[in-house]
Image (cartoon, helix red, strand yellow):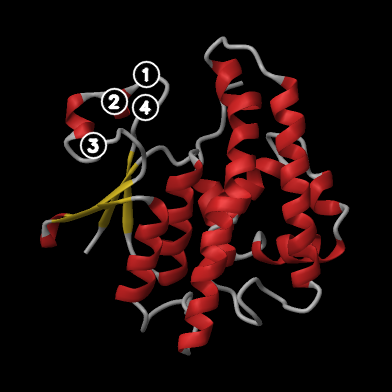
Amino acid sequence: MVVKVYGPARAACPQRVMACLLEKGIDFQIVSVDLDSGEQKKPDFLALQPFGQVPVVEEEEEGFRLFESRAIIRYYATKHADQGTDLLGSTLKEQALVNQWLEVEAHNYNEPLFAIVLQLLVFPSMGLPTDSAVVKSNEARLSQVLDVYDQHLAKNKYLAGQFFSLADLSHLPGTQHLVTTLGMSHLVKERQHVNAWWEDISSRPAWKKVLQLVPKPLE
């Protein structure tokens, strides 16, 4: 079975899904969606995802579709628990901690980070002005979150304990933007334990493969 992943490889949420599929050794095909032209808001795509967002995955042989990247990675980590990297934990308590940190990533980490992405990347690409006050306030919010992470990671190699999991994987796309395209690598580098964690998880072969799948910008 080959899983179809609808969405551009450069977008953060499809990258989250691709990283999971690669960690689990699941074959997939990227079906490009042109976000710049608004393809995700057109009827053909809305038939797949009624909110006009990426990614969507499709298992044609089983007649199954799923959207929302964190739901997708939970699904594949569970469905294929016996192959590839164990991303869920082996006990109920470990699995609970994985889910706890997935929620932290979605609500405490991603929200200020996405607000910065909108201001520094998305709005300028649409010809809209950047609100520096919004950037500054969300950078402060994110800094406070990373302070909590640094304290936690001083005692734990990974977010859910001593094993790499979905909780860590889910941070990869956003943090990659943070340290590269957003030019805010200081938020990671100035925190010893966060930096060590990032160096570890971003060096995983699956994540390196995701980055190789991202089309290079034209010169």
**Residue linked to disc 3:** 50
Q: Earlier in the sequence, mark 3 or mark 4?
A: 4
The mark lying in front, picked from 3 and 4, is: 3
Residue 37, numbered label: 1
Q: Reply above or below: 177 against 219.
A: below
Q: Residue sitting at 84 percent across and 45 percent down?
A: 186
Q: Residue at x 75, y 24 (%)?
A: 133
Type of amino acid under label 3:
Pro
Depth check, mark 3 against mark 1: the one in front is: 3
Q: Nearer the viewer, mark 2 or mark 3?
A: 3
Q: Residues within 10 Å of mark 3 (few under 14, many from 20)?
A: some
Instruction: Say what amino acid the circle numbered 1 marks.
Output: Ser
Give the secondary structure at mark 4.
loop
* Alpha carbon distance from label 3 to label 4: 16 Å
CA separation in Å, label 1 and label 4: 6 Å
- Mark 3 and mark 1 lie on one chain; the one further toward the N terminus is 1
Q: Which residue is mark 4?
A: 34
What is the C-alpha distance between the residues marked 2 and 1? 9 Å
SS for dot 3 = loop
Dots 1, 4 in contact, CB < 8 A: yes
Q: Is residue 144 left or right of residue 204?
A: right
Q: Secondary structure at mark 2?
A: helix
Q: CA distance from mark 3 to mark 1?
A: 17 Å
How crowded pointer 4 is (Cα within 10 Å; few <14, some 14-19, many 20+) is rated as few
Q: Report the quarter where the N terminus lies.
A: bottom left
Question: Which kind of residue does numbered mark 2 sit on?
Answer: Lys
